[in-house]
Amino acid sequence: MKIERVHWRNYFGGLALVFLFVEGMTGILLSLFYEPTLVGAYDSIKELYSDFPAIGAWVRDAHRWSALLLFSAIFVHALRSLVRRDFLVTTKRIRTLWVAGVLLTVVLGLLLLTGFVLPWEWRAYWTMEMLSNYFGAIPLVGSVFEEFLVGTFTLSRNFVAHVVILPVITLFLLDMHLVVVRRRTGGVSAYLFKHSLLSLPFLAAAAALTVFVPMPTSDPFVVPRPFEGEGIPVPEWMFLILVTPYLGHGENAAFAWGFLLPVVLLVGLVILPFHAGKERSRTKKEDHAMAVDSSVSRGRRAGLARSGKVRAGVVAVAVAGLATAAFGGLYSQVHVAPVMGCSSCHNVARGNRMGKPPVFFKDRTAIPLNDDPEWLVKHYYFPQKWSERTTRKPRPVSR
């Protein structure tokens, strides 16, 4: 396949690259206004809406909605590659591409998490608490990870990780993942340009979401009603798939579904081309050569072409069905998190300074509920039901 013939097979990979470029450009603009301190972070975000409503607010919302579409494009691209069994091509170059793609997905997930914490409103603070409990559930070494995250966390370190460390790793893995593109005529720049044109419908969708579904940070000027926006997901809703097992399972089962299973899946995807590829002795290039060999009859070649189209159609239907089922199941779990749910209770007008958690937020003896992962997640989703009065005793954490 020549890169000049932009095919649907690599469309979502190119779409993800386009949105990654959008994220980089909008992120650079946001970093010019952001103040990575507990006192100033939230205020610097609010100023984008109050002082620069036409540009600053649009850039921030574009950054957030583009992250959602980036995640969606990566998911469909990875699912398509898995269904098509691209890992069966066992050349060293393709193995490198596959492994780099799997690791790139993990790094982009970390970018999503660190970016979600940066505004440092109560939703971000709650996320930091859930994340530390998430790793704290690991047997034997979990308490060490939990204490490390809580004890060493600062917004400035999180900011450096988001804008320096993780982007550098992303560029390195992206260079490895685009090894095939770089070998084609025109290189990455031509690839990005052509896919930018093909991505116009999704870019238009991101622009429409930015304009018509803004996520303003306007407290205390606009005090939302309690639980306003319930049923509408925020752009960062997709990462919560890792903590949703705590909603309906015991802690051990939640650890198995929320941590152990993703780790096993990740390791399995990394080693897949090194194991499954042994079952196939020919490469795609050899298969193609056999298909067009002069010894093959014209009728046989026509049959191969028809079967190829049927196979492509089956793959398309399978990918669409699996993606719809996955996103539908995820949405059914997280859509109840209100857009303005945290700010409906935690804001200046109600006596709590949103965006400025208490100075003892790292002291879990002062806030024992932060050691209860199940309560944290349920309070995040159902604050009207799971308040301090309805909680159970937190699990003990060794120190």
Image: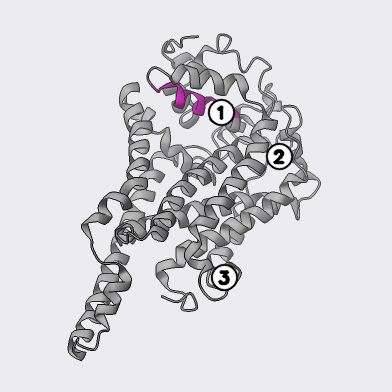
Locate residue 26, reporting x and y percent: 68, 53
Q: Disc 3 on helix, strand or loop? A: helix
Image location (x, y in percent) of residue 207 = 61, 61
- Tell me the element at label 2: loop
Say whether marks 1 and 3 touch (CB < 8 Å): no
| Label whose residue precedes the other's in the sequence (3 or 2) | 3
Is residue 250 visible in the rendered image? The answer is no
- Element type at mark 1: helix
52 left or right of 245 in image: right
**What amino acid type is highlighted by mark number 3?**
Gly
Pointer 3 residue? 187
Q: Taking 313 as reference, is 154 above or below it?
A: above
Tell me, yes or no, if residue 230 can be seen here.
yes
Q: Which residue lies furthest to the right in this view?
A: 51
**Nearer to the camera, 279 or 345:** 279
Discs 1/3, front: 3
Q: Colour scheme in the image? A: one colour
Residue 267 lies within the magenta run: no
Q: In this view, does 128 lie above or below 71?
A: above
Marks 2,1: beta carbons within 8 A:
no
- Marks 3 and 2, how far apart at CA: 44 Å
- Magenta segment: 125-138
Give the amino acid type for the residue marked by disc 2 in the picture: Ser
User: Foreground: 314 or 327?
Assistant: 314
**Residue drawn at point x = 38 percent, y = 29 percent:** 247
- Pick whichever of labels 2 and 1 is earlier in the sequence: 1
Residue holding disc 2: 218
Q: Is residue 261 above or below residue 288?
A: above
Instruction: Check residue 128 in the rendering and tell me which mark sits there, or answer none.
Output: 1
Q: Residues within 10 Å of mark 2 (few under 14, many from 20)?
A: some
The image quadrant that residue 66 belongs to is bottom right
Residue type, label 1: Met
